Image (spheres, rainbow, N blue to C red):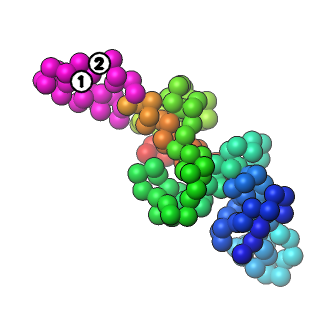
Amino acid sequence: MAFCEQCGTQLGASAAFCSGCGKQVAVPPSTLPITPTNPPGKSESAAPEPAVDNLAGLSDKWLQRFDAIEKAGGERARWWRWPEAKQLTGKEKWLITSNLWAFVFGPFYYLYLGMWRKAITLSLLALVIDVILGMAGDSLNVPVDNFLWIVSAVMFKQCANVDYYRRRVLGRKEWW
C-alpha cells in the first residue's frame, strides 16, 4: 500500500492524486504506458505528458476533487451510481457532488469552465423537467412554481465536478 509523500495519507491503488492534500502522486515507471515518449526502461516517475498538461494551473481543491472522482471509479462516477462507493469517505463524496458555484450560477458556471455543450444540454433537460413538474403541479392543484429553480440548481451542482474532470483529465468535449 502506498502513502502520500507530503501528508502521509494512504493512497488507492490507481490514485493519481492524494485525497488528503491533493498532491499529484508519482506513478512508478512500470505502470506508465509504453509510448514513444516513454520507452521501456525509462526511469522517470512522472505521469504521462497529456495528463500533466491538462492539470496545469488547477487549484489544490480541484486536484482533491479529481482524486476523489478517480477513487470513485473515474469517468463512471456519477452521484446516482458509484462503482466504488464503499471505499469513499463522507468528505470524498462531498468533493464529488458538491459545487456551490455550479449550484448558484448553473449554466453560467459551466460556460466559465468552457463546457458550453454541457451547459446547453443540462439547461434543456432542466427546462423539460421543470415543464413536466409544472404541469403535474397544475393538474394536482399544488403550487410548485416557486420551487422549480431548485431542480436545475441541484442538477448542475451534482454534475459539475465530474463533468469538469471528464473535460480536463480525459480531454472530452461532450454534449452529454
Image location (x, y in percent) of residue 9: 75, 61
Q: Is residue 155 above or below residue 49?
A: above
Kind of element beneath mark 2: helix
Left or right of 26 in this view: 78: left
Location of residue 139 (image quadrant) = top left
Q: The N terminus appears in which quarter of the rendering?
A: bottom right
Q: Is residue 99 above or below residue 148?
A: below
Mark 2 / mark 1, whichever is N-terminal: 1
Q: Residue furthest left?
A: 139
Q: Is residue 95 above or below residue 29?
A: above
> Which amino acid type is marked by label 1?
Gly
Residue position for label 2 = 145
- Residue bounds of the magenta highlight: 123-150
Residue drawn at (52%, 44%) of the image: 97
Q: Is residue 11 above or below residue 90?
A: below
Q: What is the chief secondary structure element of the magenta stretch?
A: helix
Residue drawn at (18%, 28%) of the image: 136
Residue 144 painted magenta: yes
